[in-house]
Amino acid sequence: MKRKDTRQRLIDAGLKLFSERGYLGAVTKDIAKEAGIAEVTLFRYFPSKESLLEEVIKTYSFLPALKGLLREIDALPYKDALTKIAERFLSTLSERKELIRIMHSEIPKYPSKTRQIYHGLINETFTTLASYFSEQEKKGVLRRFEPRYGARAFLGMFFSLFTSQELMLRKKLSKQESKKIIAELVEIFAKGTLK
Protein backbone atom coordinates (compact mmCIF):
# COMPACT_ATOMS: atom_id res chain seq x y z
CA MET A 1 0.00 0.00 0.00
CA LYS A 2 1.45 3.38 -0.99
CA ARG A 3 2.01 6.12 1.57
CA LYS A 4 0.03 8.66 -0.47
CA ASP A 5 -2.92 6.27 -0.82
CA THR A 6 -3.04 5.70 2.94
CA ARG A 7 -2.85 9.42 3.63
CA GLN A 8 -5.66 10.15 1.17
CA ARG A 9 -7.80 7.33 2.58
CA LEU A 10 -7.38 8.87 6.04
CA ILE A 11 -8.37 12.32 4.74
CA ASP A 12 -11.43 10.84 3.01
CA ALA A 13 -12.39 8.85 6.12
CA GLY A 14 -11.93 11.98 8.21
CA LEU A 15 -14.18 13.96 5.86
CA LYS A 16 -16.87 11.28 6.05
CA LEU A 17 -16.86 10.92 9.84
CA PHE A 18 -16.38 14.62 10.65
CA SER A 19 -19.34 15.30 8.33
CA GLU A 20 -21.51 12.66 10.01
CA ARG A 21 -20.47 13.08 13.65
CA GLY A 22 -18.65 16.40 13.92
CA TYR A 23 -15.15 16.98 15.19
CA LEU A 24 -16.09 16.12 18.75
CA GLY A 25 -18.03 12.95 17.86
CA ALA A 26 -15.57 11.47 15.36
CA VAL A 27 -12.99 9.38 17.20
CA THR A 28 -9.63 8.41 15.71
CA LYS A 29 -10.28 4.71 16.21
CA ASP A 30 -13.36 4.91 13.96
CA ILE A 31 -11.60 7.11 11.39
CA ALA A 32 -8.77 4.56 11.15
CA LYS A 33 -11.28 1.73 10.83
CA GLU A 34 -13.12 3.60 8.05
CA ALA A 35 -9.78 4.04 6.24
CA GLY A 36 -9.00 0.33 6.69
CA ILE A 37 -5.90 0.81 8.81
CA ALA A 38 -4.81 0.52 12.44
CA GLU A 39 -5.27 3.55 14.69
CA VAL A 40 -1.52 3.67 15.35
CA THR A 41 -0.98 4.13 11.59
CA LEU A 42 -3.30 7.16 11.61
CA PHE A 43 -0.98 8.82 14.11
CA ARG A 44 2.04 8.19 11.87
CA TYR A 45 0.40 10.40 9.25
CA PHE A 46 -1.39 12.86 11.51
CA PRO A 47 -0.08 13.45 15.04
CA SER A 48 -3.56 14.37 16.29
CA LYS A 49 -7.22 14.41 15.33
CA GLU A 50 -6.87 18.19 15.09
CA SER A 51 -4.13 17.90 12.44
CA LEU A 52 -6.32 15.50 10.43
CA LEU A 53 -9.24 17.94 10.56
CA GLU A 54 -6.93 20.74 9.39
CA GLU A 55 -5.90 18.63 6.40
CA VAL A 56 -9.54 17.77 5.62
CA ILE A 57 -10.42 21.48 5.65
CA LYS A 58 -7.42 22.39 3.45
CA THR A 59 -8.15 19.59 0.97
CA TYR A 60 -11.91 20.03 0.65
CA SER A 61 -12.38 23.78 0.97
CA PHE A 62 -13.25 25.92 -2.05
CA LEU A 63 -9.72 27.35 -2.24
CA PRO A 64 -8.09 24.56 -4.33
CA ALA A 65 -11.05 24.63 -6.74
CA LEU A 66 -10.87 28.43 -7.03
CA LYS A 67 -7.15 28.42 -7.78
CA GLY A 68 -7.68 25.90 -10.58
CA LEU A 69 -10.69 27.76 -11.88
CA LEU A 70 -8.89 31.10 -12.19
CA ARG A 71 -6.55 29.58 -14.78
CA GLU A 72 -9.56 28.27 -16.73
CA ILE A 73 -11.51 31.54 -16.77
CA ASP A 74 -8.68 33.94 -17.52
CA ALA A 75 -9.75 34.55 -21.12
CA LEU A 76 -13.52 34.49 -20.50
CA PRO A 77 -15.70 37.60 -20.53
CA TYR A 78 -16.18 38.94 -16.99
CA LYS A 79 -19.81 37.86 -16.47
CA ASP A 80 -19.08 34.36 -17.80
CA ALA A 81 -16.12 34.08 -15.45
CA LEU A 82 -18.23 35.21 -12.48
CA THR A 83 -20.90 32.69 -13.42
CA LYS A 84 -18.37 29.85 -13.46
CA ILE A 85 -16.98 30.91 -10.07
CA ALA A 86 -20.48 31.09 -8.58
CA GLU A 87 -21.50 27.71 -10.00
CA ARG A 88 -18.36 26.00 -8.70
CA PHE A 89 -18.64 27.71 -5.30
CA LEU A 90 -22.26 26.61 -4.83
CA SER A 91 -21.43 23.12 -6.05
CA THR A 92 -18.54 22.83 -3.57
CA LEU A 93 -20.71 24.09 -0.72
CA SER A 94 -23.48 21.66 -1.61
CA GLU A 95 -21.06 18.71 -1.75
CA ARG A 96 -19.69 19.63 1.70
CA LYS A 97 -23.04 20.62 3.21
CA GLU A 98 -22.93 18.29 6.20
CA LEU A 99 -19.36 19.25 7.09
CA ILE A 100 -20.23 22.96 6.83
CA ARG A 101 -23.35 22.50 8.98
CA ILE A 102 -21.39 20.72 11.70
CA MET A 103 -18.41 23.08 11.56
CA HIS A 104 -20.60 26.13 11.99
CA SER A 105 -22.33 24.66 15.00
CA GLU A 106 -19.12 23.33 16.60
CA ILE A 107 -16.46 25.87 15.65
CA PRO A 108 -16.46 27.68 19.02
CA LYS A 109 -15.46 24.34 20.60
CA TYR A 110 -12.60 23.63 18.18
CA PRO A 111 -8.98 24.04 19.28
CA SER A 112 -7.77 27.59 18.56
CA LYS A 113 -5.22 26.41 15.97
CA THR A 114 -7.98 24.71 13.97
CA ARG A 115 -10.10 27.87 14.09
CA GLN A 116 -7.09 29.86 12.86
CA ILE A 117 -6.56 27.42 9.96
CA TYR A 118 -10.26 27.64 9.04
CA HIS A 119 -10.31 31.44 9.13
CA GLY A 120 -6.97 31.58 7.31
CA LEU A 121 -8.39 29.49 4.45
CA ILE A 122 -11.42 31.75 4.20
CA ASN A 123 -9.16 34.81 4.07
CA GLU A 124 -6.91 33.18 1.46
CA THR A 125 -10.00 32.41 -0.64
CA PHE A 126 -11.00 36.10 -0.51
CA THR A 127 -7.43 37.14 -1.37
CA THR A 128 -7.32 34.74 -4.32
CA LEU A 129 -10.57 36.05 -5.78
CA ALA A 130 -9.45 39.62 -5.04
CA SER A 131 -6.36 39.00 -7.19
CA TYR A 132 -8.67 38.14 -10.10
CA PHE A 133 -10.57 41.41 -9.60
CA SER A 134 -7.28 43.34 -9.44
CA GLU A 135 -6.16 41.81 -12.74
CA GLN A 136 -9.47 42.72 -14.36
CA GLU A 137 -9.11 46.28 -13.10
CA LYS A 138 -5.56 46.49 -14.58
CA LYS A 139 -6.98 45.30 -17.92
CA GLY A 140 -9.49 48.16 -17.82
CA VAL A 141 -12.51 45.85 -17.44
CA LEU A 142 -13.44 46.92 -13.91
CA ARG A 143 -13.80 50.25 -12.18
CA ARG A 144 -11.57 50.94 -9.20
CA PHE A 145 -12.79 49.36 -5.96
CA GLU A 146 -11.27 47.49 -3.02
CA PRO A 147 -10.91 43.97 -4.48
CA ARG A 148 -10.98 42.19 -1.09
CA TYR A 149 -14.34 43.80 -0.28
CA GLY A 150 -15.57 42.81 -3.74
CA ALA A 151 -14.47 39.20 -3.13
CA ARG A 152 -16.24 39.14 0.24
CA ALA A 153 -19.40 40.61 -1.28
CA PHE A 154 -19.42 38.24 -4.23
CA LEU A 155 -18.81 35.02 -2.31
CA GLY A 156 -20.99 36.29 0.54
CA MET A 157 -24.02 36.57 -1.74
CA PHE A 158 -23.70 32.94 -2.75
CA PHE A 159 -22.83 31.68 0.72
CA SER A 160 -25.96 33.42 2.00
CA LEU A 161 -28.03 31.76 -0.75
CA PHE A 162 -26.56 28.36 0.12
CA THR A 163 -27.10 28.87 3.86
CA SER A 164 -30.71 29.97 3.51
CA GLN A 165 -31.65 27.27 0.99
CA GLU A 166 -29.69 24.19 1.93
CA LEU A 167 -28.86 24.65 5.60
CA MET A 168 -31.93 26.46 6.92
CA LEU A 169 -34.72 25.42 4.57
CA ARG A 170 -33.01 22.10 3.73
CA LYS A 171 -34.15 22.52 0.15
CA LYS A 172 -31.75 22.13 -2.76
CA LEU A 173 -32.41 24.49 -5.65
CA SER A 174 -33.28 22.91 -8.97
CA LYS A 175 -30.75 23.43 -11.77
CA GLN A 176 -33.14 25.86 -13.44
CA GLU A 177 -33.68 27.90 -10.24
CA SER A 178 -29.98 27.90 -9.53
CA LYS A 179 -29.08 29.12 -13.03
CA LYS A 180 -31.66 31.91 -12.80
CA ILE A 181 -30.50 33.11 -9.37
CA ILE A 182 -26.81 32.92 -10.31
CA ALA A 183 -27.47 34.94 -13.50
CA GLU A 184 -29.38 37.60 -11.54
CA LEU A 185 -26.79 37.92 -8.76
CA VAL A 186 -23.91 37.99 -11.26
CA GLU A 187 -25.72 40.74 -13.19
CA ILE A 188 -26.20 42.81 -10.01
CA PHE A 189 -22.56 42.36 -9.00
CA ALA A 190 -21.22 43.06 -12.50
CA LYS A 191 -23.23 46.29 -12.79
CA GLY A 192 -21.61 47.50 -9.60
CA THR A 193 -18.05 46.60 -10.64
CA LEU A 194 -17.73 46.98 -14.42
CA LYS A 195 -16.06 50.14 -15.72
Image: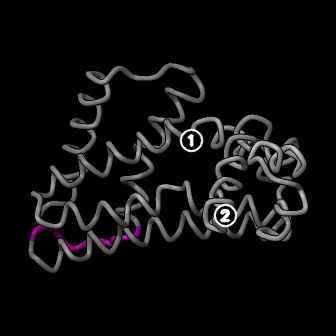
Identify which residue is drawn at 29% across, 31% down.
181
Q: Give percent across and percent down for residue 39.
A: 89, 56
What residue sits right under mark 2 in the picture?
A: 55
The mark total stands at 2
Is residue 66 left or right of 38 when viewed as pictured?
Answer: left
Q: CA distance from mark 2 to mark 1?
A: 15 Å
Residue range in magenta is: 141-148
For marks 2 and 1, give the one nearer the viewer. Answer: 2
The one of 16 and 103 positioned closer to us in this rendering: 16
Colour scheme shown: one colour
Viewport quadrant of the C terminus: bottom left
Quarter of image, res 114:
bottom right
Q: Is 179 drawn above or below residue 191 in the view shown?
A: above
Indicate yes or no whether the magenta region holds residue 145.
yes
Q: Is residue 160 magenta?
A: no
Q: Identify the mark nearer the N-term, 2 or 1.
A: 2
Q: Amino acid at mark 1?
A: Arg
Query: Mark 2 falls on what kind of element?
Result: helix
Q: Residue at x 40, y 58 (%)?
A: 65
Left-right relation of 87 to 102: left
Name which residue type carries label 2: Glu
Mark 1 Cα-neighbour bin, 10 Å: few <14, some 14–19, many ≥20? some
Magenta region's main secondary structure? loop
Secondary structure beneath disc 1?
A: loop
Residue under the point 48% across and 35% down: 162
